[in-house]
Amino acid sequence: MDFYMVFNSRERCMRAERLLQSRGIAAAVTPTPAGAGSACQLSLRLDAGQKSDAYTAVMRSGLQAGVKGCFVQDGLRLFRTACQ
């Protein structure tokens, strides 16, 4: 299962990717999945098991204001979920 953190700007998405990778959290910039809203069209894809650590790091860095939503993709289905 993939976890997506959708941002409101490309810059914040890229900054969050660098932040998470520097903390050993595997994060990859990817196009925002269809159904997750348009936002900036870029999201971070993470392992669902790391979502809490990832969101905590983003929150502490001050980038949480750029998070537009969080989603889990199970096969072809996309579900909105809590970011924490």
Image (cartoon, helix red, strand yellow):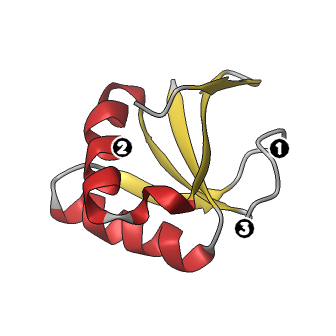
Q: Earlier in the sequence, mark 2 or mark 3?
A: 3
Query: Which secondary structure lies at badge 2?
Result: helix
Q: Residues within 10 Å of mark 3 (few under 14, many from 20)?
A: some
Q: Is residue 72 above or below residue 15?
A: above
Q: Give me the C-alpha separation between circle 2 and circle 3.
A: 19 Å
Residue type at mark 2? Tyr
> In the figure, is residue 79 to the left or right of 83?
right
Mark 3 or mark 1, earlier in chain = 1
What residue lies at 18% left-to-right and 65% top-to-bottom?
22
Residue at the far left in the pictured view? 23
Q: Residue at x 51, y 34 (%)?
A: 3
**Disc 3 and disc 1 in contact, CB within 8 angstroms:** no
In the displayed structure image, the side of residue 28 where residue 74 appears, left or right: right
Q: CA distance from mark 1 to mark 2?
A: 22 Å
- SS type, badge 3: loop
As rendered, which of 64 and 7 lies closer to the eye?
A: 64
Check disc 1 and give the amino acid type: Ala
Residue in the image at 40% along x and 30% along y? 84
The one of 68 and 42 positioned closer to us in this rendering: 68
Helix, strand or loop for disc 1: loop
Q: Quadrant of residue 73?
A: top right
Q: On the rendered structure, is 84 left or right of 66?
A: left
**Residue lying at 26% horizontally and 51% vertically, measured from the top left:** 57
* Residue tagged 2: 55
Name the quadrant containing residue 63. Answer: bottom left
Amino acid identity at mark 3: Cys
Disc with the residue nearer the chain's start (1 vs 2): 1
Label 2 crowding class (10 Å Cα cut-off): few <14, some 14-19, many 20+? Answer: many
Using the numbered discs, state the Cα–Cα distance from disc 3 to disc 1 in whole angstroms.
12 Å
Q: Which residue is mark 1?
A: 34
Task: Classify residue 38 as left or right of residue 1.
Answer: right
Residue under pointer 3: 40
